Image (cartoon, coloured by chain):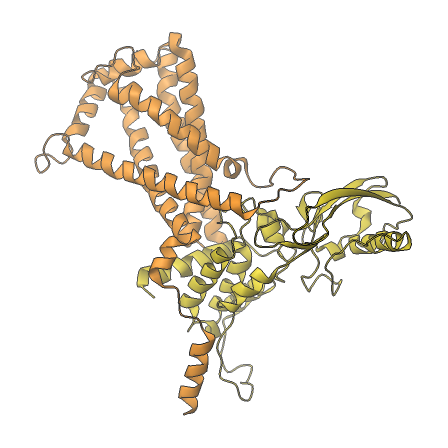
Chain colours: A orange, B yellow
Amino acid sequence: MVVSGTRDRAAAATPPAPGRKAVYRSTVGAKGVMAVSGLLLLLFLVAHMAGNLKIFFGAESFDHYAHWLRDIGAPVLPHTWYLWIQRFVLTAALVGHAWAATVLALRAKRARPVRYAHRPKVQGSYAARTMRWGGVIILLFLVWHLLDLTVGTVNPVGNPATPYANVVAGFAPSRWPVTLFYALAVVAIGFHVRHGLFSALRTLGQRTAKGEQRARVAALGFAIILCAGFLSVPFAVLVGLVG
Amino acid sequence: MKLTLRIWRQKDRDARGRMVAYDVDGLSADMSFLEVLDVLNEQLTTAGDEPVAFDHDCREGICGACGMVINGVAHGPQKLTTACQLHMRHFKDGDTIDVEPWRARAFPVVKDLVVDRSAFDRIIQAGGYISAPTGSAPDAHATPVPKVDADAAFEAAACIGCGACVAACPNGSAMLFTAAKVAHLGTLPQGQPERPSRATSMLAAHDEAGFGGCTNTGECTAVCPKGIPLTVIGSLNHDVLGAAVRGR
């Protein structure tokens, strides 16, 4: 009797858990979508950056690598199938990432209807403060980048058969404003990754002081390596190391 | 010492507020910030004006009742310090100081610097407790707790629920407060039975109250008078997503 009484009281005191669906609709659910999609995009960036470095092995090697990308998974997967699967997954990740960012940004705006009269700069890192606008800039860059080196419409050569020539022409010294835009966008990605990776690990449950240190170091490391790798190609073309 | 205070005056919940400047003279550097407001209120009362309303209770930095944004920083410029323990020696003679209430949709202003923090009570009611059979108190050593866990739980339990984290957060999020409670109870053996539902229910109450989401910026922990670490938010995320994955 006592036991059942205790249980009844406990049941009365504890409101029913909102359930699994409610979690996905919660702020932490949106952050989870943000973290997982962000990690997928980061994985792609690392592979993309490493592949770019092939350019230092010469035109033949780089072009061969670029064409191989269309045949990944062969002969199980037909020509370009893997590429389209990857494009589909990355687009889904990007949409999920932007959706979560929009939901959370609108929520944050609603959460403080009256602004502070006196508000010094937020004390958090520059990277953390620029996540939202940085993300929009990166998205705009992505559109240009796809038109430049994937579709080729804004590239001086724009021939899908000769990716090496496209890269060399695209970053030619005479097109320095384009190269500058690339460099700024890559730095923006660096900042985005620096806070984003740390934040994603925290969202996915990183909760020790030592782990926090490791997560910050890893985030900074990824940001620096990505920046250095991505910037090395336009820099090499600009100074004539690749041409 | 002499100061100019620019204070948010708002008659009631529905009135429009504005910053009003007051000169206060004859202050001592050893006064606390609340004592300066006391001096100002004596002046105002003597002159027949309405005194500035502000929350306060223990004035020892442990109750969490006081709280105002001083020059844009919750509880003012001194780290790990509540407004009542902030002394005027940290300011210069002749300074102009801006004083505002916590600003968040979930913390509506009741009057001047007083905000309604019952949203925090609703979060606690949603799961910030353990269910224990009543009766004689169990022996203190009946449930052993590892020292590491006891320390971690105590660190989180130091939260006084003042709301400075919300006031400082660029997203108006109460995640540090909610997570401190989840981490405190979830680290101890007594908190295990309700652990999955606690995190999910408290988060639901948090979101329902209109607080924003966390972006791990760390503003909250920078102003927290009790130094609650940002890692507690990882504990909340861990419990919430863990419960969702396990379907509980």
Q: Which of B128 and A202 is in front in this view?
A: B128
Asked whether residue A220 appears in the rendered view, the answer is no
Q: Position of residue A129 (x, y in %)?
A: 53, 37
Q: Position of residue B72 (x, y in %)?
A: 68, 43
- Relative to B80, is A55 on the left or the right? left
In the image, farthest residue toward the top: A174
The image quadrant that residue A145 belongs to is top left
In the image, farthest residue toward the bottom: A1
Which residue sits at x=23%, y=16%? A59
In the rendered image of this protein, does residue A149 appear above or below residue B41? above
Q: Which of B53 and B56 is in front in this view?
A: B53
Q: Quadrant of the C terminus of chain A?
A: top left
Q: Nearer the viewer, residue B140 or B90?
A: B90
Asked whether residue A82 appears in the rendered view, the answer is yes
Q: How many marks on residues?
A: 0
Q: Nearer the viewer, residue B119 or B68?
A: B119
In the rendered image of this protein, does residue A158 appear above or below residue A228? above
In the rendered image of this protein, does residue B183 appear above or below residue A42? below
Which residue sits at x=34%, y=46%? A36
Which residue sits at x=88%, y=51%? B28
- Relative to B73, is A45 on the left or the right? left
In the image, farthest residue toward the left: A75
- Relative to B76, is B167 on the left or the right? left
Q: Where is residue A105 in the image (x, y as percent from the top left)?
A: 47, 42
- Relative to A61, is A94 on the left or the right? right
Q: Where is residue B199 in the image (x, y as percent from the top left)?
A: 44, 63
Q: Quadrant of the N terminus of chain A?
A: bottom left
